[in-house]
Amino acid sequence: MIVTHFLSLHGDRLVAAFITHLVYVAISVSIAFVVALLLGILFSRAPRFAGFMIPIMSIFQTIPGIVFIGILFLYLGMRPITAVIALSIYAVFPILKNTYVGLVEIPAQYVEAAKGCGMSPIQILARVEIPLALPSIISGLRISTVYTVSWAVLTAMIGLGGLGEFIYAGVSSNNNALILGGAIPAALMAIMLSQAIDLMRKILIPKQIRRDIK
């Protein structure tokens, strides 16, 4: 009864906020995945440089999201690109770290065997290293996606929509129904996307590799 009443009052706005939130997450994580994959590959070729840069990037992750979004807001204004840039930057690190770790921990004999078969560096990367590092990469993707769902709540604070609208409206008006109306769909979105990535993991990673990493 309560849920039905809430949906009758806010259903259309809730659906629009859910879609907006999902779009922010999908675009930001997609951008972050490409950037992190490229950086992870580059860092794996220069471990000393990675040993210097990765800790610095991890410190950057400790900056509160609202502070960073607020700074971008001052320069870029209230535009979707502001939210996408901020969320993409925050989403990079978990994927980057797992990509780097996955690549550098590949046993050397696999790479040497590929070289012995006459593979080029690009072929070794595409056919040997990336497939073997895929469990770690996808794990980083899952972490990044779940985090981004929560970070995307902050976009509402600069008027860019998303489920955070309900949460902040509920907090400001002491309305628990509005808070739950934003929090529950956000939690469900995180679970849904996590399960989708788990399914992708099962499809992309051969059973033998999954068995070996358990």
Image (cartoon, grey):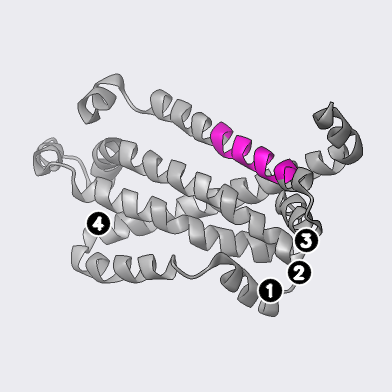
- Please indicate whether residue 58 sits to the left or right of residue 210 in the image: right
Distance, label 4 to label 3, CA atoms, is 47 Å
Residue 117 appears in view = yes
Q: Could you say which is closer to the camera, residue 69 or residue 164?
A: 164
Residue at 30% across / 60% down in the picture?
Answer: 42
Mark number for residue 73? 1
Distance, label 2 to label 1, CA atoms, is 6 Å
Q: Could you say which is closer to the camera, residue 27 or residue 194?
A: 194
Q: Residues within 10 Å of mark 4 (few under 14, many from 20)?
A: some
Q: For the residue labelled by badge 2, is the local secondary structure a helix, a strand or a loop?
A: loop
Residue located beneath label 2 in the image: 78
Q: Which span of residues is magenta-colored?
A: 180-192
Distance, label 3 to label 2, CA atoms, is 21 Å
Residue located beneath label 4 in the image: 44
Q: Looking at numbered disc 4 in the image, what kind of residue is underneath it? A: Ser
Farthest residue in the right direction?
9
- What type of secondary structure mainly makes up the magenta span? helix
